[in-house]
Amino acid sequence: MTDPLWKPSVERSAASNLVAFMDWQREERGRIFTDYENLHTWSVNDQNSFWSDFWDWAGVISQEKGDRILVDPDKMPGAAYFPDARLNFSENLLRYCSENAAIIFRREDGLQREVSGYALVALAGKVSRALLAMGIKPGDRVAGFLPNIPEAIAIMAGAAAIGATWTSCSPDFGVQGVLDRFGQVRPKVLATVDGYVYAGKHIDIRDKVKDVAQALDSLEQLIVIPFLENAPDLRNLPKALTLNDWLHGHSDAAPDYVQLPFDHPLYILYSSGTTGAPKCIVHKAGGVLLQHLKEYILHTDIKPGMRHFYFTTLGWMMWNWQTSGLAAGATLMLYDGSPFHPDGNVLWDYAAEEKFDVFGTSAKYLEGCLKGGIEPIKTHDLGSLKTILSTGSVLVPEGFDYVYERVKADVCLASISGGTDLCGCFVGGVPTQPVWRGEIQAPALAMDVATLLEDGSRAPVGEKGELCCMGPFPSMPIGFWNDQDGSRYFDAYYSTYENVWRHGDFAAFTDHGGMIIYGRSDATLNPGGVRIGTAEIYRQVEQLQEVLESIVIGQDFDGDVRVVLFVKLREGQTLDADLIQRIKHRIRQGASPRHVPSKVLQVHDIPRTRSGKIVELAVRDVVHNRPIKNKEALDNPEALEQFRDREELKV
């Protein structure tokens, strides 16, 4: 393709926060940046100046900033940012709250609520005082087993205001999945609901909550938010009070924000855990704040008052990311329920009716809309929509085509990629740059992103390598919970290349300075010793109308690895010889002969994590008769049984 899919207008580019930051640099610091690439190079080479200046320009609220910005920059892990700073995450999160709406909420069944900024601050203040009355101290864990509701944000903010550490998962998790996570970090407080709504069903979870609460011997208080019933029966739940009863008598003044070190533990997030117990990743308050402010203000171009939506649950780091939109002045648009009930228009209805500025979702959701024939460009007024964000998996080029042809032509489609590991992005959107088909726009500011070959050298443009970060960044985790000597944390990211973060994705830079990600490098196929990214196969297969979804693995066979492709077909379709040949032909022509699978087999479902990621490694383990250590990480663990002991895989 010789032309980009989208280019910002001169007016839009000039009005962007990114240009405003460059103008400030010229006027206040005498630095002149001609374009994004120029700015990025400086931000990587002079992190001290970039982060100090960004702190000032973004107006970070702190008791103390300190003169030291980046200490021990050559140590990964070990580098430290703002070691003398004292601040509070919640104070920065709630800084823009006013009489205007801070949160607008919709539930699948039509329930709607609006929460003003003042009401959100008041609720967070009550929560902070109720926690203090219990004796909760900085570093104590407060957990949420909650839907994506306003109370979840208020309780998190109240906890962070006094220095408690927040952790969460969504109410569709099974008992063991919750205990695999919360059981490791031992929360003193657990906030939950009586049930939730999904795909037309009201699902009571009180029995599940009872089992979780009884198993957590650290638990001092269970807080239940009525979500299905106005007055749910809590008699069988240990140590339980409704939220209102727990908060009764506490002042609704703003929290007294405790000033804490930059590296104070804010969040504990969890790896997907599909190959073992989830890793508990501890994130620092200052690092998350700075990283998210940069990503919201400079990369997403959020301005105060904009309406920002991300379809997520509390089991995905995008909930934590979405919540930080408040710190940039956004109104958060929350949704809880199925994105395809009663049909695939429900989120586009919400976007049109509430005039979203930013619509965030997963690549799989966009692909689902494409497969479902959803065409908002014909049916919805999305005139206010400026940016569409996509993450969670690789957005294939056809997904880009879908957005520009069937959703909105004049929109910045920002495919972004990072992860739970950093609670942020390595590469993402740039509002002043064009969007090219199938490409993430650019490396994020102050992130020295590289693709490395096996010998540690940088891969040439267009050649695939390991996605790495060559220098430190503020949201590097503190480490893993209960990893006393740091060895598990070191092995996860730093053991492949010395003093370099290896992220575990397979990627290549493009001629435009953007990036294409080809899927997880630890799930990379290796037939005949040639590395193949799984996303290259998915891109071809899922263009076929008969195929809804697919998953591909490498099976050890006859002293080598052979490619095995499993497909989920549309209702009424059969995997016959003709379709198999067309699948193989499509892959051969669109990818390469090496990508062509040795076996193509039909399944009725594709196993995936609760955040929607397909689990190639778990399927590979089942095929090889290896144990799956943590099925609770999966949304549909029963789907794995289709892959076990298949006769077709024995020949």
Image: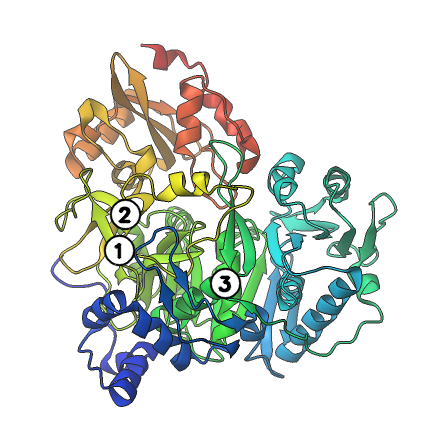
At 63% from the left and 57% from the top, the residue drawn is 139
Nearer the observer, 397 or 117? 117
Quick one: SS at disc 1? strand
Q: Quadrant of the N terminus?
A: bottom left
- Residue pointed to by mark 1: 449
Disc 2 marks a residue whose amino acid type is Leu
Nearer the observer, 489 or 330? 489
Quick one: SS at disc 3? helix
Q: Quick check: 613 above or below 81?
A: above
Q: Are marks 2 and 3 in contact (CB under 8 Å)?
A: no
Nearer the observer, 271 or 528? 271
Q: CA distance from mark 2 to mark 3?
A: 24 Å
Q: Sequence-wise, which precedes: disc 1 or disc 3?
A: 3
Disc 1 marks a residue whose amino acid type is Val
Q: CA distance from mark 1 to mark 3?
A: 23 Å
Q: Quadrant of residue 649?
A: top left
- Which of discs 2 and 3 lies nearer the camera? The answer is 2
Q: CA distance from mark 1 to mark 2?
A: 7 Å
At 19% from the left and 43% from the top, the residue drawn is 456
Q: Are marks 1 and 2 in contact (CB under 8 Å)?
A: yes
* Mark drawn on residue 467: 2
Q: Sequence-wise, which precedes: disc 2 or disc 3?
A: 3
- Residue pointed to by mark 3: 322
- Which of discs 1 and 3 lies nearer the camera? The answer is 1
Q: Sequence-wise, which precedes: disc 1 or disc 2?
A: 1
In this image, 481 relative to 410: left or right? Answer: right
Q: Quick check: 443 above or below 650?
A: below
